[in-house]
């Protein structure tokens, strides 16, 4: 914050060379103070909310995870007892396994579908404006609406899907939500329909950043569409792809609404995700400490995943 | 400097907005109209978890109460069922609880030991509550260690709905228009087999949603007919892994898998029955309110048939509780109890939603008897076998539902499901 050259009244009048540094000095001194203040002013509403609703709960959550606590009752300090209890809980491992399974099946699906839709919409053909809205539209609906729609479509005997299949000659009733594999497929289908529009928009922004002259030059050199895609589009989208993959896997780790509302974690507990198990532990069984500890384990797993992705994918640059 | 001052002013303004929001509530009620006696009416906050029709009926009751009682004014807040108890619990913990709230009898085992709700024995006499006037089966389920913890409003039980047209066409109704079957489990199965034989092919002889609550409530109804127990006396162990528990679940499983009377994996049992594609449906009393709105549906109701030793069914109650406040205000508590008692006394209004009133005199009133269907299943007030008090009753239900679902979709045998559920419940209770 100290000006590099001391400024005096004399210096101002007699040394034109020093004049420049005086201005610079003022900037870093008085002006920057007020600029900083303004920056803080603009930041303060968000910062206040961030500290109060993000940072404070995160710290508080960790403290709670060290206690055995039901809201309304006294809490008892148990140290890392909740964490060791989690590691012995087979339901926790099952839920974590289910969650990772969903991350693995959903992330590639949603990233690739997102790119394909963005390419379609970006092709400049007729009707792409309509398609762009159509693909994005489900994203603005709430999860309860999305789940109701899909249960309505997929339910046996009266559902839309089976009725259509019946007219196509399928005689057997298909139970989309009642075997683990089909249930996952249904949840994936609903998730893609709901969220792929957002990925598409990100990719679309990336595509529109690519200068046209690159394609022009390639065409002159005799490149076909596949070459253009492989050697221009994909490398240019690298940054966006990394971003989408990381955002998508974090979102998939947090899967709750779709599986909770479509299958309620069933059949049995085969589609119960970690977030649902945390919810049940916290608000059905009222074990706040255990639930907080599980949240922290999930948090660590997600951090680990994100770090690996950044390392692995950014290395190629 | 001027700018810095401006910044400070804006900061102060921002801060005052954040801190100011807590004081607005009190000023809002200060100019409320005075009643005849010149006193300001007591303002009560009232929370309910009612979706759909229930919410509208309760809203009408609160409006009626506010109109007829000038001393007490009630403001109702209807919350989503899924988050209701979480919010109620956190509201009590953060000392912002409503004055009076709806709670299910099955939830009292969780609320009472956590000191979230006030005991009512001191308050009740002043508010004119006469415990004798309630049905004792319903009332007893709300008493903890000899203390009254809630004012019951109703009971809502599992009952049997049947399609009169389908059964009539198949010649399976007796002279009085009731379903004609012989007593006992075999008699009921034979009856459904005849429905399957004689009714059109697209009609389901028995229908209900195949996962979640319906199999669970059905199992509890049948198990209760054999005097089965859910938990041990001390509430620390599962007590349902026995012949009776398995027999009840086997009966349900056979309906689906052995006899093919209840199609597999139905997701919308009530809707299928309402659409006239199901002959018999086990469902909650509140479905009466839904089904009777269906013009084309000619249906009848009765209590769950006695398949085993005696009549019994699953049921729960809506009750009114007084959440614990920052500071006890006897006047407000008394007003809240007066309101709760009024709701119970006017249970005939509430019965429009399908629920059975908790007060004997209401059940015997002309107003209640004039409602169609309700009198056909009013005996449930004495048949309901409430689940035992446990602060883990909800998660125990989650375990049973998840395991019964596996029986229902054919992934587990009765034996496997009951064994697994017993182990999981014991693990839960030993935590």
Image (cartoon, rainbow, N blue to C red):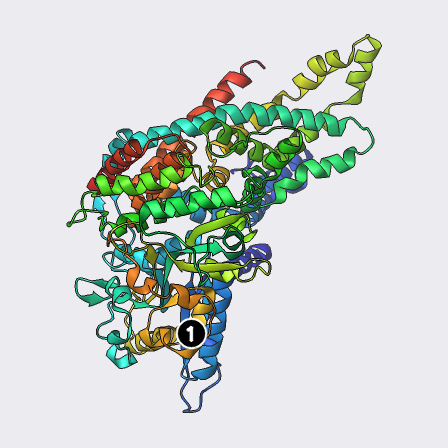
* Residue shown at 57% from the left, 39% from the top: A150
> In the rendered view, would you say B19 is above or below A86?
below
Residue drawn at the location 42% of the way across and 43% of the way down = A55
The percent coordinates of residue A311 (x first, y second) are 49, 18
Q: Nearer the viewer, residue B117 or A295?
A: B117
**Is A47 placed left or right of B187 in the picture?**
right
Can you identify the residue that label 1 sits on?
Answer: B369
Residue most extreme to the top: A222
Query: Foreground residue, A13 or B208?
Result: B208
Residue A66 is at least partly visible in this image? no
Q: Residue A140 placed where, x, y %?
A: 62, 44
**Residue B84: % across, % down:** 41, 56
Q: Residue at x 72, y 39 (%)?
A: A133
Under circle 1, the secondary element is helix
Q: In this rendering, is residue B256 above or below B284?
A: above
Residue B416 position by quadrant: top left
- Which picture quadrant has residue A32? top right
């Amino acid at each position: 914050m100290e000006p590099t050259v001391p400024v005096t009244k004399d210096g101002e009048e007699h040394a034109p060379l020093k004049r420049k540094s005086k201005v610079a000095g003022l900037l870093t001194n008085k002006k920057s103070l007020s600029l900083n203040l303004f920056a803080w002013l603009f930041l303060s509403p968000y910062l206040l909310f961030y500290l109060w609703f993000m940072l404070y709960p995160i710290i508080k959550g960790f403290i709670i995870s060290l206690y055995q606590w039901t809201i309304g009752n006294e809490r008892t300090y148990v140290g890392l007892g909740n964490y060791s209890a989690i590691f012995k809980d087979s339901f926790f491992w099952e839920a974590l396994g289910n969650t990772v399974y969903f991350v693995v099946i959903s992330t590639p699906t949603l990233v690739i579908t997102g790119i394909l839709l963005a390419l379609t919409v970006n092709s400049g053909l007729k009707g792409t404006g309509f398609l762009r809205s159509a693909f994005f539209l489900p994203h603005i609906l709430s999860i309860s609406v999305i789940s109701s729609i899909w249960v309505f479509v997929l339910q046996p005997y009266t559902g839309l899907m089976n009725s259509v299949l019946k007219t196509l000659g399928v005689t057997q009733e298909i139970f989309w939500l009642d075997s683990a594999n089909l249930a996952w497929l249904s949840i994936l289908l609903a998730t893609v329909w709901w969220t792929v529009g957002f990925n598409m928009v990100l990719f679309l922004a990336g595509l529109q950043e690519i200068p046209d002259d690159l394609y022009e030059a390639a065409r002159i050199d005799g490149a076909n569409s596949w070459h253009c895609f492989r050697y221009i589009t994909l490398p240019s989208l690298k940054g966006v792809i990394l971003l989408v993959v990381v955002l998508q896997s974090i979102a998939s780790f947090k899967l709750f609404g779709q599986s909770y509302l479509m299958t309620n974690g069933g059949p049995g507990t085969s589609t119960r995700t970690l977030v649902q198990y945390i919810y049940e532990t916290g608000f059905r069984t009222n074990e706040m400490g255990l639930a907080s500890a599980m949240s922290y384990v999930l948090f660590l797993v997600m951090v680990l995943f994100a770090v690996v992705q950044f390392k692995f994918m950014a290395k190629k640059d | 400097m001027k700018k810095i001052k401006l910044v400070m002013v804006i900061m102060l303004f921002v801060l005052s907005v954040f801190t100011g929001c807590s004081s607005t509530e009190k000023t809002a009620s200060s100019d409320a109209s005075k009643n005849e006696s010149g006193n300001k009416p007591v303002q009560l906050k009232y929370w309910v978890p009612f979706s759909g029709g229930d919410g509208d009926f309760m809203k009408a009751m609160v409006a009626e109460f506010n109109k007829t009682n000038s001393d007490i004014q009630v403001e109702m807040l209807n919350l989503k069922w899924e988050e209701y108890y979480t919010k109620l619990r956190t509201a009590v913990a953060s000392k912002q609880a409503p004055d009076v709230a709806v709670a299910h009898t099955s939830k009292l085992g969780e609320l009472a030991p956590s000191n979230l709700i006030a005991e009512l024995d001191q308050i009740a006499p002043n508010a004119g509550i006469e415990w004798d006037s309630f049905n004792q089966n319903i009332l007893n389920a709300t008493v903890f260690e000899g203390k009254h913890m809630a004012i019951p409003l109703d009971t809502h039980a599992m009952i049997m709905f049947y399609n009169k047209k389908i059964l009539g066409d198949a010649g399976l109704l007796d002279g009085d228009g009731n379903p004609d079957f012989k007593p006992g489990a075999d008699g009921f199965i034979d009856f459904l087999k005849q429905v399957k034989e004689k009714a059109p092919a697209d009609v389901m002889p028995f229908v209900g949603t195949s996962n979640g609550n319906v199999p669970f409530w059905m199992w509890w109804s049948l198990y209760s007919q054999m005097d089965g127990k859910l938990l041990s006396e001390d509430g620390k162990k599962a007590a349902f892994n026995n012949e009776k528990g398995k027999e009840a679940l086997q009966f349900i499983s056979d309906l689906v898998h052995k006899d093919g009377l209840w199609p597999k994996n139905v997701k919308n049992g009530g809707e299928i029955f309402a659409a006239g594609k199901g002959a018999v449906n086990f469902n909650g009393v509140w479905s009466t309110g839904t089904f009777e709105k269906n013009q084309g549906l000619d249906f009848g109701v009765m209590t769950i048939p006695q398949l085993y030793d005696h009549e019994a069914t699953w049921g729960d109650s809506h009750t009114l509780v007084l959440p614990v406040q920052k500071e006890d205000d006897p006047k407000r508590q008394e007003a809240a109890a007066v309101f709760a008692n009024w709701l119970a006394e006017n249970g005939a209004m509430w019965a429009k939603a399908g629920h059975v009133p908790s007060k004997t005199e209401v059940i015997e009133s002309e107003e209640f008897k004039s409602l169609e269907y309700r009198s056909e299943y009013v005996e449930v007030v004495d048949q309901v076998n409430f689940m035992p008090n446990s602060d883990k009753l909800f998660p125990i239900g989650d375990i049973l539902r998840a395991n019964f679902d596996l029986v229902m979709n054919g992934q587990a045998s009765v034996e496997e499901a009951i064994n697994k559920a017993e182990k999981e419940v014991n693990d839960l209770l030993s935590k």
